[in-house]
Image (spheres, rainbow, N blue to C red):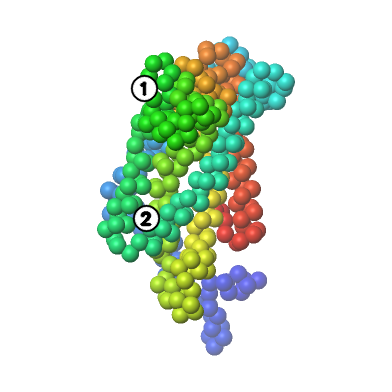
Amino acid sequence: MFKLKCDDFLVYDEATDTYSMSQEQKVRDETERNHWKTAGLTILKDWRLYAMLVPMMLVFFFWKYMPMYSLVGSFKSGDEVEVLEREWVGLANFAHLFEAGEDAIKFWRAFRNTFTLAFYGLLFGFPFPIILALFFNEIRSNITRSIMQVCVYLPKFLSTVIVTTLIISLFKGQGTGQEMGVVSKFLVLICGENSGLGIQAATGNGLILSTRYFRAIYIVSDLWEHAGYDSIVFFAAVIAVSPTSYEAAQIDGAGKMQQMRYVVIPSILSTVIIMLIMKMGSLLSIGYEKLYLYCNSADRGNYDVANVVSTLANEWGSNGSTIYQSYAIAAEMLNNLIGMILVIGSNFISRRASDVSLY
């Protein structure tokens, strides 16, 4: 019995009938004994790099982990100001969102808007950065490529308020005596003043505050803002493809499109799958700031299509009612739970279908 336990890390010598430790095992034991000492010396040596992590850790602690105690409010209700002091009601707040009533109608309309904008954002916003990365890879001039990359990266670094104000200014109409936006003037010019699109662009507050065209404008503006920056990961994966793969494809007579189809895309497929799974995690986390600014105007003409779960939760949480604060927390928590299920489900399907998964 003793021999069975020792055979895993000791070498048996039949001539002397003794056990001895191999050199490799001595090295492993020495490494295990000095593990924390080595880790401490490494941190001390590279302390500047670890010091740069402190701000990020503080941000995550105060803005991601500290607010988690408020999630308890989704299971509590009452008139107390402090969330933890309210009465425990279990799933009553969640049940209120499923019951027939005005609050339930508002919530499910907001959830439908959230899912619709998220679906269109994924449908158009996920493939476009990949196409951009493939396009950048085909540009042979490094100067031209750098200039074009900088141009498409810049919108990401603009403030959300600036982007929102710019979009509203471009698409605004002649309502309340204001001057028509540049894009609205162009649409009126090419479509005619009497056409449906021309009338919608010229009158009132323009297309951005209309229920019919708001989603299209939001998706296009979001694509313009984020597609270039999101293409960085895919471009890094594309340039990592071995040149010998291109040479082998060229010898076989493959053109540019065939090289993309049979060489580049299969090579970056694992990166695409990982990024898609991560995208699913934030699928329902629609940009709260932009939508709040878009539907916070005086007439709120786009409220029925621009109001999502996060803006509805802000509306409920800031109306002064502690009961609606509990409803707001429950709505956000339900939205996040659905997002978590989407991540787990997409990761499970990916692992079964392609052996590539996030975890």
In the rendered image, which quarter contains the C terminus? bottom right
Residue 79, image x and y in percent? 58, 11
Of callouts 1 and 2, which one flags the residue occurring earlier in the amino acid sequence? 2
Residue 50, image x and y in percent? 33, 47
Q: Of residues 46 and 224, which is closer to you in this image?
A: 224
Left or right of 36? Residue 84 is right
Amino acid type, residue under disc 1 in the picture: Glu
Residue 66, image x and y in percent? 47, 30
Above/below status of 86 relative to 290: above
Residue at image point 29% right, 52% down = 147
Residue 122, image x and y in percent? 54, 45
**Label drawn at residue 236:** none
Residue at image point 44% right, 73% down = 246
Above/below status of 211 relative to 177: below
Residue at image point 55% right, 80% down = 12
Left or right of 241? Residue 19 is right
Q: Residue 33: tell me if it is visible.
A: no
- Local SS, label 2: helix
Q: Mark 1 and mark 2: span between their CA atoms?
A: 64 Å
Q: Nearer the viewer, mark 1 or mark 2?
A: 1
Amino acid type, residue under disc 2 in the picture: Ala
The mark tally for this picture is: 2
In the rendered image, which quarter contains the N terminus? bottom right
Q: Which residue is mark 1?
A: 179
Left or right of 39? Residue 263 is right
Q: Of residues 206 and 262, which is closer to you in this image?
A: 206
Q: Of residues 81 and 269, which is closer to you in this image?
A: 269
Q: Which residue is mark 2?
A: 39
Left or right of 62? Residue 200 is right
> Callout 2: few (<14), some (14-19), or many (20+) C-alpha neighbours within 10 Å?
few
> Callout 1: few (<14), some (14-19), or many (20+) C-alpha neighbours within 10 Å?
few
